Amino acid sequence: MNKQIKITFLGTGTSQGVPVIACECNVCQSNDSKDKRLRSSVMIETKGRIFIIDTGPDFRQQMLRNNVTDITSIIFTHEHKDHVAGLDDVRAFNFKLKKHIRVYAEERVQNALKHEFAYVFADNKYPGVPQIEINLIENKPFEIDGIKIIPVRVYHHLLPVLGFRIGNFAYLTDVKTVPEEEKSKLKNLDVLVLTALRKEEHISHMNLSEALQFTREIKPNRTYLTHLSHRFGLHEQEEKLLPGNVMIAYDNLTVLSS
């Protein structure tokens, strides 16, 4: 099978990251680099294009850590702070590449960005503000430079969120429920990336048992768990307990998909 999509996990943590400020639990105090989690984001490289899904508060650090020198576009799942707060740092790419950065988001998410980053969208822009080209997406397939992207509607408690499928790779973060009609978009996956916040029940995220049940239902070749909190457990210990086709993602992990 030709693996044409490279996925880099820029961050795999929940909204507070891991370690959590001032926490003394064994996960936050771990010396294992796989237990150090920036806020969740992925970089997708395919056919000479580089897509970033979500720019959380750690976006600058993630770009530097992975020596990213170009991006094609940014795609947003939803408007929560841990997924959008780093948008200002696209200024560096504007300066280096001498181009606007294309941004793709639903109307509601666009409205939140316009509120959060009003100076970016002002009629009279201050010199040096981020230069972006904003594009409206809905729960319908769209293309970026000929690459087809299929949105997948999921729900983060009551908040509509978009996951995305590119080829046989799908990314679903901040998800508690997936409508039955959306599951058909997830057939025959090679790689599924899926929230598994912690072991205990949570109102707006799948926990570990729910993520495993969803994996059994969807039947991807491989599942990588992400958006993990410090209450998920230690990477080394917990991964030993998972089915063979389910792995715990960690920051800087790269995987290939068809």
Image: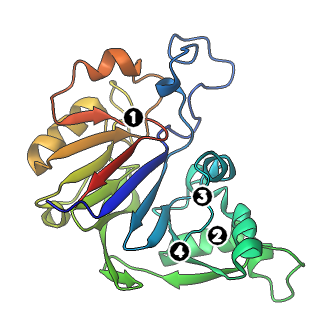
Give the residue pinned by disc 3. Answer: 68
Please state which of the two labelled residues, at mark 3 or mark 4, is closer to the viewer: 3
> Could you tell me which residue is drawn at 33 percent across and 29 percent down?
201
Q: Tell me how far mark 3 sits from mark 1, CA to CA.
A: 28 Å
Instruction: Give SS at disc 1.
Output: loop
Report x, y in % for residue 24.
61, 11
Q: Of residues 244 and 151, which is closer to you in this image? A: 244
Q: Tag 1: residue type?
A: Leu
Per the rendering, the mark at residue 113 is: 2
Q: Tag 4: residue type?
A: Thr
Per the rendering, the mark at residue 72 is: 4
Q: Tell me how far mark 3 sits from mark 4, CA to CA.
A: 11 Å
> Could you tell me which residue is drawn at 32 percent across and 24 percent down?
199
Structural crowding at the residue carrying mark 4, measured as other residues with C-alpha within 10 Å and reported as few (<14), some (14–19) or many (≥20): some
Mark positioned earlier in the residue sequence (2 or 3): 3
Q: Tag 3: residue type?
A: Val
Q: Tag 2: residue type?
A: Leu
